[in-house]
Image (tube, coloured by chain):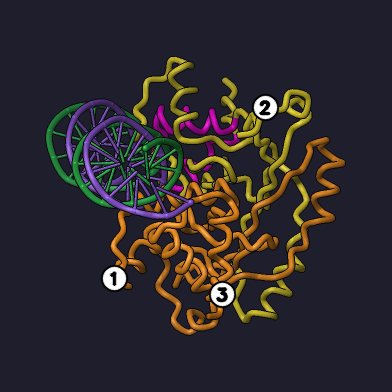
Chain colours: A yellow, B orange, C green, D purple
Amino acid sequence: MANKPAPTHLDPLKQSGLKNTRQRKAILDILASGNQPFAAEDVYLSLKQNQVDINLSTVYRSLETMREKNVVRKVSVAGDNRMLYELNLHTHQHYLVCVQCKKICPVGHCPLESFEKSVAQETNYTIMGHRLDIYGLCPDCQQTRQPDR
Amino acid sequence: MANKPAPTHLDPLKQSGLKNTRQRKAILDILASGNQPFAAEDVYLSLKQNQVDINLSTVYRSLETMREKNVVRKVSVAGDNRMLYELNLHTHQHYLVCVQCKKICPVGHCPLESFEKSVAQETNYTIMGHRLDIYGLCPDCQQTRQPDR
DNA sequence: CTACATGCAAACCGTTTGCACCCTA
DNA sequence: TAGGGTGCAAACGGTTTGCATGTAG
């Protein structure tokens, strides 16, 4: 009678006092399934495809409540007007976005710490954070560059 | 009979083959009036306030056509879901946004050139650009921090 | 005179919300 | 069984578009 070890991304629900519902578990499963952020609609469509019955506004609402509890993060990337959501792994993270196929991949290092300090000095702002994303052509798309658009 | 020297931000219309209409001139005047980017609605409201009769969709349409001709640039900053527009001064530019009063001010230097090179090497992407904005509390708002929200 | 620009109203798309019902703890 | 969670449909806010009319070149 071993305890089933719960997937690590499910603990946060219990930890943050949120009810552990079928829908939230399913959403977290999707977010955990890749290390790139998802739009609410991506989550919704993936769930439908996996035969999970859910409503789009539930997706939005759940993502938002989980964001309030810091279970997930909301990010925006250049070239997509939608907001994207990802598991909050508590790491500082930026993304590299392919302008053609829209593939998104994380980049590890961030060079902005010292820059923020110098901006703070010059401007007397209290710097709280930054948003950075890099865009370009991924190796695949370099071969098949679309006519300009 | 001296030629009236046209404001420098009006040349681009002629140069890019766009018709020099009352509305476009007025929009460019607004964009030139401050060195921060404006939302379409900001432009619209400023124009109304200056007794310039114009339609909001004209503002959107003009900004978009002028963007196609690289007369203006479209940027998005953290904490505002609207797109912002600015004169395209052909300088590389980032912004510092106050999370409380939403004031936006330009920051000159950008430290990302060498970082882009190293990302390109690591990932084999062709880097085409980046989006960076910094957010924090401006000096004024540091005194009057709003209760968390 | 004609191609491009504008005004108006309606559509659009991502996201949020009110309300009745449901289900986890 | 109580209070949070969900489904549904309608509203919302920023932006775009179709069409008839206006105007710069």
- Kindly state the secondary structure of the residue where label 2 is placed: loop
Give the class, few, some or many, for how many residues have Cα within 10 Å of label 1's Cα (few <14, many ≥20): few
Q: Is residue B142 magenta?
A: no
Residue A93 shows which numbered tag?
none
Q: What chain letter is assigned to the residue under label 1?
A: B
Q: Please report the residue visible at 77 percent of the width from the left and 62 percent of the height from the top.
A: B111
Q: Position of residue C15 (x, y in %)?
A: 39, 43
**Same chain, labels 1 and 3:** yes
Which residue carries the number 2 mark?
A146
Residue range of the region highlighted in magenta in the rendering: A8-32
Q: Please report the residue visible at 80 percent of the width from the left and 50 percent of the height from the top.
A: B116
- Kindly state the secondary structure of the residue where label 3 is placed: loop
Q: Nearer the viewer, mark 2 or mark 1?
A: 1
Give the class, few, some or many, for how many residues have Cα within 10 Å of label 3's Cα (few <14, many ≥20): few
Q: Is residue A10 magenta?
A: yes
Q: B87 or D24, which lies in front?
A: D24
Q: Please report the residue visible at 62 percent of the width from the left and 56 percent of the height from the top.
A: A131
In three-dimensional space, the C-alpha distance between marks 1 and 3, rounded to whole angstroms, equals 24 Å
In three-dimensional space, the C-alpha distance between marks 2 and 1, rounded to whole angstroms, equals 45 Å
Q: Is residue B34 left or right of residue C5?
A: right
Q: Position of residue C10 (x, y in %)?
A: 21, 35
- The three-letter code of the residue at mark 2 reads Gln
- The three-letter code of the residue at mark 3 reads Pro
- The three-letter code of the residue at mark 1 reads Gln
Q: Position of residue A143 (x, y in %)?
A: 78, 24
Residue B51 shows which numbered tag?
1
In three-dimensional space, the C-alpha distance between marks 3 and 2, rounded to whole angstroms, equals 42 Å
Give the class, few, some or many, for how many residues have Cα within 10 Å of label 2's Cα (few <14, many ≥20): few
Which residue carries the number 3 mark?
B5
